[in-house]
Image: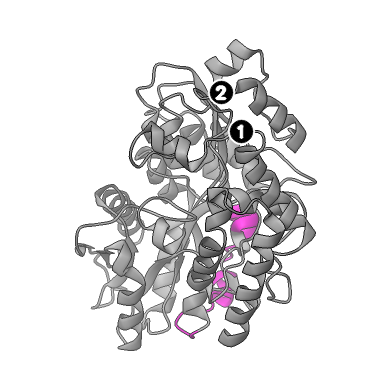
């Protein structure tokens, strides 16, 4: 699942770094089956993304010399508008990277349904990717094939756990187990047990663990349900009642622009639940650390970060575009994602491979098997067409709650529910 705004500034609920400008690279194949025009593949990202995609495209062209591919990187903040303009003008990309805004495109008839092409290619998304295989669907049609998908995992400071005599976190931890551990690990005013769950992929995980949902099966908002309210209240109480999570003021005291991603390597928090990218800040730390699956509530549920590959409606080379996507999400091509240490491949076979479990760049003994384990209980996010507007409503509606000005999750979510109902009703 990239927050289209936050996602583009990091691997968010499927998000990546921002490029300084549009970069175009071409890999050409030759052969009697070649089309005169290369496939155009648009992605967002920075230089590491460019290098990884290009390496995968080079493998594709070596495997299928009849294909030509032009890679175009578009600055993250400009990506949605740019590709929609291209599609509207009849020159949309053949292959385009998508994330949680996939249904903004599909609801506007801008993407090609992929079910028939997948069946023709014998690509079974569930078999290849597990539960995230059906992530990018809208009205029972598949619009993108998962490409990257890494579940939220729990980063924990092994030295702090050992010093306090706290056992390492596991997927079987309950909320009570988790709170008890956070209390043991907290040193008032100095160290907090947990970095917090203010970001929606974090507290949504709690909501789904508790049996709740953000948008129900009928497409209606459900954030004021008892299950979601209880989950958000628990997350808020960690900050203001139990004081095992830094408040905004506590984070401000640590320095400018400090959040969990920085507080964990600085040993200000003992645990931090977030995405794969956190590892890049831990390569030179002097303390022992590891990762574990996120704890459970009434059931196991966790957010994932990633993106998929779709085909625009304007593509004139649909068979070739899917042929490319099929290869790019195969073990051979997905292994290149590991080599860069950049992200988690969506392909489950690759997640379980030794190349991923013991990557050459990992100098610490880390349980990388956690990602494949966690993929089994990734929940399907509500990728509704009004995704961006929904995020704004939720973020604005919970601002006072996370500041501690409004301590009641029930009051906060009741107001958010009304705003979401107006938004989705008017959009419908």
Residue 56 seen in the figure:
yes
Residue 83 in the image, given as x and y percentages of width and height: 33, 76
Residue holding disc 1: 243
Picture quadrant of residue 322: bottom left
Indicate the colouring scheme. Answer: one colour
Q: Are marks 2 and 1 in contact (CB under 8 Å)?
A: yes
Residue holding disc 2: 188
| Residue 126 is covered by the magenta coloring | yes
Where 84 falls versus 208 (above or below)?
below
Task: Identify the residue at horizontal 46%, vertical 39% (top origin).
Answer: 249
Task: Identify the residue at horizontal 33%, vertical 39% (top origin).
Answer: 256
| Residue 114 is covered by the magenta coloring | yes
Q: What is the spatial separation of the Cα atoms under label 2 and label 1, in whole angstroms? A: 8 Å
Q: Nearer the viewer, residue 48 or 390?
A: 390
Quadrant occupied by the C terminus: bottom right
Q: Name which of mark 2 and mark 1 comes first in the sequence.
A: 2
| Residue 85 image label | none
Q: Nearer the viewer, residue 70 or 205?
A: 205
Q: Residues within 10 Å of mark 1 (few under 14, many from 20)?
A: many
Residue 52 in the image, given as x and y percentages of width and height: 32, 49
Residue lying farthest front?
Answer: 405
Q: Nearer the viewer, residue 225 or 385?
A: 225
* Element on which disc 2 rests: loop
Residue 247 in the image, given as x and y percentages of width and height: 52, 39
């Amino acid at each position: 699942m990239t927050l289209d705004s936050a996602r583009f500034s990091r691997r968010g609920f499927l998000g990546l770094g921002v490029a300084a400008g549009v970069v175009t690279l071409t890999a050409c194949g030759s052969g009697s089956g070649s089309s005169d025009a290369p496939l155009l593949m648009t992605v967002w990202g920075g230089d590491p993304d460019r290098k990884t995609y290009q390496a995968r495209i080079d493998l594709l062209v070596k495997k299928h010399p009849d294909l030509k591919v032009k890679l175009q990187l578009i600055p993250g903040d400009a990506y949605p508008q740019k590709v929609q303009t291209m599609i509207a003008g009849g020159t949309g990309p053949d292959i385009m990277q998508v994330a949680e805004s996939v249904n903004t495109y599909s609801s506007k008839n801008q993407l090609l349904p992929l079910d028939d092409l997948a069946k023709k290619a014998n690509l079974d998304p569930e078999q290849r990717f597990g539960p995230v295989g059906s992530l990018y669907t809208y009205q029972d049609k598949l619009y993108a094939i998962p490409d990257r998908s890494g579940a939220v995992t729990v980063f924990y400071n092994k030295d702090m756990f050992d010093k306090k005599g706290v056992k390492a976190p596991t997927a079987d931890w309950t909320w009570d187990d988790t709170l008890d551990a956070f209390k043991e690990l907290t040193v008032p005013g100095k160290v907090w047990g947990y970095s917090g769950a203010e970001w929606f992929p974090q507290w949504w995980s709690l909501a789904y663990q508790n049996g709740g949902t953000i948008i129900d099966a009928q497409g209606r908002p459900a954030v004021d349900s008892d299950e979601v309210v209880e989950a958000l209240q628990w997350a808020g109480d960690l900050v203001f009642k139990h004081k095992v999570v830094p408040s905004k003021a506590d984070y401000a005291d640590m320095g400018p622009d400090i959040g969990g991603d920085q507080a964990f390597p600085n040993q200000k928090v003992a645990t931090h639940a977030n995405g794969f990218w956190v590892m890049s800040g831990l390569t030179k730390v002097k303390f022992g650390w590891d990762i574990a699956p996120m704890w459970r509530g009434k059931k196991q549920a966790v957010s994932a970060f990633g993106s998929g590959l779709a085909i625009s409606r304007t593509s004139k080379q649909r068979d070739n575009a899917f042929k490319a996507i099929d290869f790019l999400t195969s073990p051979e091509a997905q292994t290149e994602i590991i080599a860069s240490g950049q992200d988690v491949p969506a392909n489950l076979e690759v997640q379980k491979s030794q190349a991923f479990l013991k990557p050459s760049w990992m100098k610490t003994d880390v349980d990388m098997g956690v990602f494949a384990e966690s993929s089994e209980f990734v929940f399907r996010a509500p990728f509704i067409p009004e995704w961006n507007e929904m995020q704004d409503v939720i973020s604005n509606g919970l601002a006072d709650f996370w500041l501690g000005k409004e301590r009641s999750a029930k009051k906060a979510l009741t107001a958010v529910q009304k705003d979401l109902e107006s938004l989705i009703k008017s959009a419908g």
